[in-house]
Image (tube, helix red, strand yellow):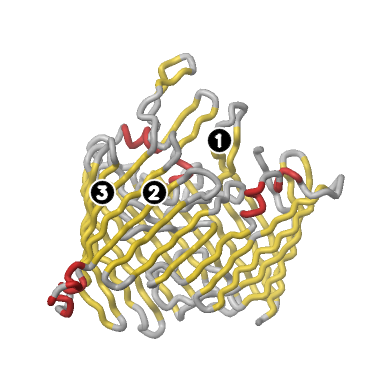
Amino acid sequence: MKKYKLTLATLMLFVSTALAQKIPAAVAGSADPSSMTGGIGLTRIDTAWYYTLNIAPELAFGKFGVGLDLTLNISSNSRQIRKEDFDETYDYIRIIRYLRWGHKGDDVYARLGVLDYARLGHGFIMYLYNNSPSYDGRRLGTEFDLSFGKYGFETVYSDFAREGVFGIRGSVRPLQYTSLASVPILGGLEIGATWAGDMRRNSRDTSFAVGNGARQSSNEGTMNVIGADIGLPLLRIPTVSSTLYFDYAKILSFGDGEAIGLETNFSGLGIFDLFTKFERRWTGDYFMPNYFNTFYELERYQLSGTLFSSKAQVLNNLISPGPGYFGDLTIGILGKLQIRGTYSKLDLQPTSGVLHLGTSTGSLIPLFVVDAGYDKKYIVDNKDVFTLDERSLLYASIGYKPYPFMIVSMLYTWTFVPVVDANGNTSFVTQKRIQPKVSIVFPL
């Protein structure tokens, strides 16, 4: 059901030492914040009004972390809980936003629930993948990685309730099995192989209109991407690690591409930490780097009446994309503030720009709290970067502390909500929310 929500007033209660970060912890040394968030408010859904109660704790205990999100909408007329929110078994499961052990890059990393920024290997096939583009479309997925030193693997699955995106990367350090294991740089050479696919049968659909509201089906089936990579650790010292890598990927039944890149992580420098990544890419016909990305679940397949669009359809029309580049810069300050920006663009395609920005100040700034994230695709020029439209995802919360125990803030989101038409087809429409908050902070 299509929903229009307007929160008129919300009283939020926090038990927290810092606000939860929503951007990926790319920088070593980033702190794990804990928060206990609860609120009451007034929400409009279609033409009906509801009192809304929300409880959303995010807690970290060493390597273990948990995030929950329970929202109850109580009718202002009948005083009954809105039954549509809990009419399926899966509605109860999604109360668990995530369970986590460790972080990406640890020898053991596991996450169950919402996948905010999933990645495989160097990210040439899957990078910053988000399995849940909105609360109403939230899904239960998993990431599970193991490293045994000489070899290891990474896995991603997007949705336990139904078919979804699955990916796996295996890696090995072959010279660790030889006398060259102790040789600097060369001994750490890593070779990896990746397969990722969308198990939904319409994920490869490149149908096109033939007139009179009809369409011609084409390439129906599952979308699969395979790849291989080589990584060479150029530097491994306590404060700096740097890896030079080469990636190749092939979208089955479509095209292929390759990239050479450099990742560097500066950590333990005192005041700040720094992560940088830069890739130079060469792509052939019918190929997209980072095919499974932040916008994938919004782009993959939409059918509403006679209107049809899919990511595979765009891929099938991608001729001579040419070379391009990708950059990622993440800055961490005092283990509390993290700022991240990524940008990619093809040299010969003026509308190919894709941007991601994110930041969270936590408790770094005494009087203010800022938590924000922004994604934009198909960027043309600098003026187009911050134009909010159907190409955008945004959340921003700015708070002021008039007293040490109080935060007065405003949350603004520009996101998407799923809509199901009369034929059962799902598409997404933009949704804007403005939420004023008065928060009381109790230190643990």
Residue 19 in the image: state x and y as whole percent.
58, 71
Q: Which residue is mark 2?
A: 292
Q: Amino acid at mark 1?
A: Thr
Q: Residue at x 56, y 62 (%)?
A: 98
- Image position of 113 (left or right of 250): right
Question: Which image quadrant: the C terminus?
Answer: bottom right
Give how far across and how far down residue 309 sits, in percent.
Answer: 44, 32
Q: Percent x, y for residue 143?
A: 45, 60
Between 74 and 219, the one nearer to me in the picture: 219
Marks 1 and 3 sit apart, C-alpha to C-alpha, by 30 Å
Q: What residue does disc 1 label?
A: 426
**Closer-to-camera residue (71/443):** 71
The residue tagged 3 is 249
Q: Quadrant of residue 428?
A: top right
Q: Amino acid at mark 2?
A: Phe
Q: Secondary structure at mark 2?
A: loop
- Inspect this view and state whether residue 280 appears: no
Number of numbered markers: 3
Q: Position of residue 25 (x, y in %)?
A: 44, 69
Q: Is residue 219 above or below residue 387?
A: above
Of all residues shown, which one is farthest toward the front?
177
Answer yes or no: is residue 148 visible: yes
Image: 242 above or below 327: below
Callout 3 touching callout 2 (CB < 8 Å): no
- Residue 443 sits above or below residue 229 on the image: below
The crowding category of the residue bearing disc 1, from other C-alpha atoms within 10 Å (few below 14, some 14 to 19, many at least 20), is some
| Identity of the residue drawn at 39% across and 85% down | 270
Q: Nearer the viewer, residue 68 or 348?
A: 68
**Residue 33 left/right relative to 341:** right
Q: Amino acid at mark 3?
A: Ala
Q: Quadrant of the N terminus?
A: top right
Q: In 3D space, how far apart are the residues under numbered discs 2 and 1 (Cα atoms)?
A: 19 Å
